Amino acid sequence: MQKILYFGRLSDVTGTSEEMLSIPAEIETAGALREWLDVRFDASGALLDPTVRIAIDSEITFDTAPVGDASEIAFMPPVGGG
Amino acid sequence: MQKILYFGRLSDVTGTSEEMLSIPAEIETAGALREWLDVRFDASGALLDPTVRIAIDSEITFDTAPVGDASEIAFMPPVGGG
Amino acid sequence: MLRISGDPIDAGLELNQFESRAPGAGGIVTFSGQVRPEAQQGEVNTLFLQAYSPMTEHGIEAAIADARSRWALDDVLVLHRIGEMKPGDTIVFVAAAAKHRRAAFDAADFLMDYLKTEAVFWKKESTARGAHWIEPRDADYADASRWTKKETV
Amino acid sequence: MLRISGDPIDAGLELNQFESRAPGAGGIVTFSGQVRPEAQQGEVNTLFLQAYSPMTEHGIEAAIADARSRWALDDVLVLHRIGEMKPGDTIVFVAAAAKHRRAAFDAADFLMDYLKTEAVFWKKESTARGAHWIEPRDADYADASRWTKKETV
């Protein structure tokens, strides 16, 4: 089980800001996870938007990063400051 | 009688920060008053220093300004801010 | 020092505590920001601010370290409120103490530019027309770019 | 608003009162200056500050009016202490409230430059070596000249 976080407007799309998930073994990268979750939530590409960054265990990463060993994966729309 | 004010380091020279004075009729201008007071206080030119400005009734003025009608004459060393 | 919390910020109390921690510093500059009553889409009822701990903290701490490396500062304080707020509530409080007031002004200014543009926060405004997440403003980016420009020009 | 007084300044209290007068302003920048413990001639025992009323007030009020004409400000407050003070005492407190933080920062900065260089005050430091009147510093003049340079360059 891995923790997935959806920040900002993404939580409106997913209906949750946080969930525990068993990511299928064939989903190996952050990029593949984006696509799989976008279909799962019927998000119409909201998770595919290139301005949405993915953080693995609190480090911003690229779509090529492996997700297998991650304990926390966060989807982050552009941050607007406070 | 006219009120004379000595600000900042000038009060160390004159020994007072404020006095009421009858200025002799022949002392007609601010410049003449400077010279007369410098002698009177044995101030060795402290009141003649060109950086010392004279204000008549709260208005900075020149040495040529008449002092006869002034109610308050102030001797002001350079202001250093707060 | 950094504190991110859902509790209300009492700017005056914080200033006095900061002042007593840095006695005789010379000068203290503070910025306190309030939730604005007016939004792009009408009058604000509430503002909701979301952080991602510890990423938000790490980013602000890096900005504080950057400010300390740029200016001779005796002390720095950043307080940021998260969660639900009302118009007029203090959302951010920054204080910088330095012997020279120029350093204190520049550091507070610099930290505010970071906090308003790059800090890891997401915010949602609720008005009579509903709630919407706020995207970054161009003017904020222009402010933040002042600091890097200084190095290259 | 301007107040010159021999009473101690409570910066935190003043900030909270200022904030409640300008609710929802967007941003408030404050500067509080403390009497420094070290002087050119050793450790400061006391600082004595002298004003010339109403000339001192008129000068500061003109600077406030100038700041209001340069930047869109919601409110401005200048407090200056006079008489005898000890190191660590707050000698000056400036607050500027504006919708845009850049205006609040610039106005507070501008007013401090005026207060530290052109304001009609005379000050005397007392140290173990005796008392002496302080003359203007060149660095302060350089700060104040920034504002006129902006208009001519």
Image (cartoon, coloured by chain):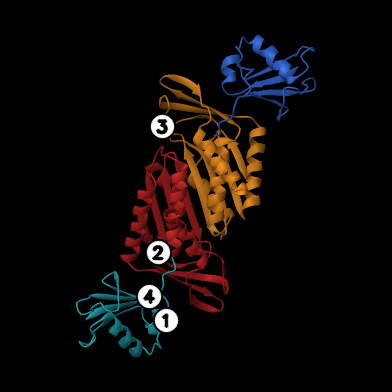
Chain colours: A blue, B cyan, C orange, D red
Q: CA distance from mark 1 to mark 2?
A: 21 Å
Amino acid type assigned to the residue bearing label 4 in the image: Phe
Q: Which residue in the protein does label 1 denote?
A: B12
Amino acid type assigned to the residue bearing label 2 in the image: Ala
* Residue for point 44% across, 45% down: D103
Q: Which residue in the protein does label 3 denote?
A: C37
Q: Which residue in the protein does label 2 denote?
A: D119
- Chain designation of label 1: B
Q: How many marks?
A: 4
Badge 3 crowding class, 10 Å Cα cut-off, few under 14, some 14 to 19, many 20 or more, is: many
Tell if the residue under mark 1 belongs to the same chain as the one under mark 3: no
Tell if the residue under mark 3 belongs to the same chain as the one under mark 4: no
Q: Is residue B26 visible?
A: yes
Q: Which mark is residue B7?
A: 4
Q: Is residue D13 visible?
A: no
State yes or no: discs 4 and 1 in contact (Cβ < 8 Å). no
Quick one: SS at disc 1?
helix
Among the 4 quarters of the image, the one containing residue B62: bottom left
Tell if the residue under mark 4 belongs to the same chain as the one under mark 1: yes
Residue D39: % across, % down: 56, 70
Image-based side of A6 in relation to D90, left or right: right
